[in-house]
Structures are given as structure tokens and as C-alpha cells.
Amino acid sequence: MSGITKYLAVQDTISDYVGKVVSWITLVLILVLLYEVAMRYWFNSPTAWGHELSTMLFGALGVFAGSYTLRDQAHVRSEVIYMFFPPRMKAVCDVIVYVLSLFAFLVFFKMSFDFAYESWKMGEISSKSTWQPVLYPIKSAIPVALAFLILQNVAELVRSVLKLFNVEFDDPRELEPDTDR
């Protein structure tokens, strides 16, 4: 196995692991919402924390799912035209998209890091409900999730550059059995 194949396999494994671990947030989110609905409509006693916690869980799920979704090539793209391109033209389009995305993700990472840092520095709490949870842990999830997305974006950029220049490599993603993940 070449160094590039090992790198791609490790990066894909990281994104896969993050996606699978974070998918459990969905179950927690459903349980929180079920509890909130039951308390609100059956017992006429809504919680002070249900809505805000569900918003935080959904936000974490959304940002952490990015690297997993990119790893599986499941983000929306205009396939109407793309599917008719030859492999080399697809690689050109992919390189352009991944380079532009990398710059955007790096800017977002810097902004989100500063956002989380300021939240930690001031010990920020929420003023949206009487529960008043601390916000810095959920705000810290944003740059962490962006770091995973940047790493997967780099792996996709490497794949695209190799395809663009017709470099032979074993793509670990293509060596996996075709199953519904």
C-alpha cells in the first residue's frame, strides 16, 4: 500500500468514525424532543431546557456531519452537467471546488475559533431561556468540526489532483464493499 493510499485510508477512517459517533446525537435529540413534547402536551409542564438543548444537539449534528458527508460524496452537486463530463474534466471541476472550499473552510475555521475563544474567555451563558446553559462547549464544536471537514477536504483534493494527472493509486473508498453505510 502506497503512502498516498495509507493517508487516504486513515483520513477516510477518521471521517467515517466521526460520522458514526456523531450519528448517535440523533437518538439523543429524538429522546429530548419526545420528552419535551410529552411534558408540554400531556402533562402541561414544558421543560426550561428541552428546546434549547435540542437546538444545540441539532447544530452539533449538522456541523460534525460535514466530513462524513464529504467522505461519502453525499453533498449536493449539479449532476445534470457533471455526469456527462469525462473523468479528466470531472477532476478539473473537483480540484477547483476543493481548492475554493479549502480557502472558505480556513476562513470559517479562523472565525469560529475566535468565536469559541471569546465564548470561553467570557464564560458565556445563554440568555434564551431560564435554563441558561454555558455556550462555550457547543461553540467549540464548530472549529473542531471544521477541522475534520478541512482534513477530509484535503484528502478529496489529493484524490482529485491524482485523477487530474492520471496518477495510478488505490483509492481506499473504491476498495470498500458496496454496502449501504
Image (cartoon, helix red, strand yellow):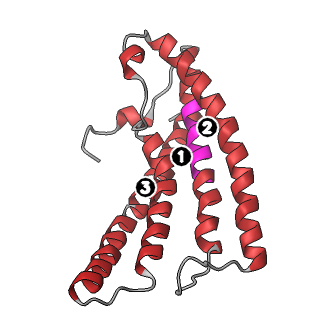
Q: Mark 2 points at which residue?
A: 154
User: Residue 11 — which label?
Assistant: 1
Q: Where is residue 44 in the image (x, y as percent from the top left)?
A: 27, 88
- In this view of the protein, can residue 167 be seen by the observer? no
- Residue 152 magenta: yes
Compared with 29, 158 (above or below) is: above
Compared with 60, 4 (above or below) is: above
Q: Where is residue 80 in the image (x, y as percent from the top left)?
A: 36, 17
Label 1: how many Cα within 10 Å (few below 14, some 14–19, many 20+): many
Q: Position of residue 161 (x, y in %)?
A: 59, 22
Label 2: how many Cα within 10 Å (few below 14, some 14–19, many 20+): some
Horizontally, residue 30 falls left or right of residue 125, namely left
- Is residue 60 or residue 157 the one in the foreground? 60
- Is residue 72 or residue 166 the one in the foreground? 72
At a point 40% along the width and 40% down the height, the residue shown is 72
At a point 57% along the width and 84% down the height, the residue shown is 132
Gap between marks 2 and 1 measured at Cα: 9 Å
Q: Name the residue under label 3.
A: 19
- Is residue 122 or residue 4 the one in the foreground? 122
Q: From this viewpoint, which residue is outermost toward the front? A: 44
Q: Do the numbered discs 2 and 1 sit on residues whose CB atoms are within 8 Å? A: yes
Query: Sequence-wise, which precedes: disc 2 or disc 1?
Result: 1
Query: Under tag 3, what secondary structure?
Result: helix
User: Residue 42 — which label?
Assistant: none
At a point 61% along the width and 78% down the height, the residue shown is 126
Compared with 67, 50 (above or below) is: below
Query: Sequence-wise, which precedes: disc 2 or disc 3?
Result: 3
The residue under label 1 is which amino acid type? Answer: Gln
Which span of residues is magenta-colored? 147-157
The residue under label 2 is which amino acid type? Answer: Val
Compared with 101, 149 (above or below) is: below
